[in-house]
Image (spheres, rainbow, N blue to C red):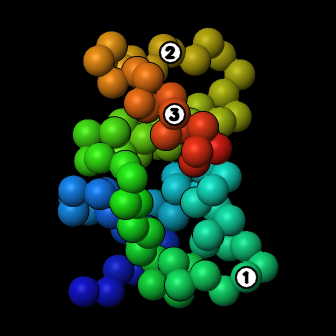
Amino acid sequence: MSIPSDYVKLISADGFEFIIHREAAIRSGTIKNMLVGPAQFKESVENEIPFSGIKAVILEIVCRYLYFKWQYEDCTTEIPQFDIDPEYVLETLMTADFLEC
C-alpha cells in the first residue's frame, strides 16, 4: 500500500510500522538526509524507512519525540518535560544519537 507523500512509514526491526507526518520525521537529521538529501535514496522514493536495529518500543518513543520536537520547535514559553520510562532511557538516547534528533 502506497502512503501519501506528506507521510513517512518507519519500520522497526520487529516489523511494526509507524506512519508519521513527513514534517515531524525530518526533525531527525538522519531521516531528513534519507528523504530530502541530494542523493535519490530508495527511502525518499518509497517514503518507507526500515530500521533493522531499532525495536518498536524505542521507535515509538522516537516518533513521539519527533512530534514533540516539531510542536515546540519555535516555542517562546517554557517547554514541558518529555518523559521516558527509565528502563528505555539508555537505548532511546543511543537511538536518538544515531538519528540525530
Going 60% across and 37% down the picture, which residue do you hit?
Answer: 97
Relative to 6, does residue 88 appear above or below in the rendering? above
- Label 3 environment density (alpha carbons within 10 Å; few <14, some 14–19, many ≥20): few
Tell us which disc is closer to us: 3 or 2.
3
In three-dimensional space, the C-alpha distance between marks 1 and 3, rounded to whole angstroms, equals: 26 Å
Where residue 61 sits: x, y (%)?
36, 36
Relative to 16, does residue 45 appear above or below in the rendering? below
Q: Amino acid at mark 3?
A: Met
Q: Residue 57 versus residue 7: which sits nearer the camera? A: 57
| Observer able to see residue 63 | yes
Task: Please tell me which of labels 2 and 1 falls first in the chain.
Answer: 1
In three-dimensional space, the C-alpha distance between marks 2 and 1, rounded to whole angstroms, equals: 37 Å
Going 39% across and 53% down the picture, which residue do you hit?
Answer: 53
Q: Amino acid at mark 1?
A: Ala
Task: Please tell me which of labels 3 and 2 falls first in the chain.
Answer: 2
Tell us which disc is closer to us: 1 or 3.
3
- The image quarter in which residue 82 lies: top left
Q: Which quadrant does the N terminus fall into?
A: bottom left
Is 57 displayed left or right of 27 in the figure? left
To which residue does mark 2 refer? 80
Where residue 19 sits: x, y (%)?
33, 62
- The image quarter in which residue 34 lies: bottom right
**Number of callouts:** 3
Specify the label residue 82 is tagged with.
none
Task: Please tell me which of labels 1 and 3 falls first in the chain.
Answer: 1
To which residue does mark 1 refer? 39
Q: Amino acid at mark 2?
A: Pro
Tell us which disc is closer to us: 2 or 1.
1
To which residue does mark 3 refer? 94
Is 11 displayed left or right of 80 in the figure? left
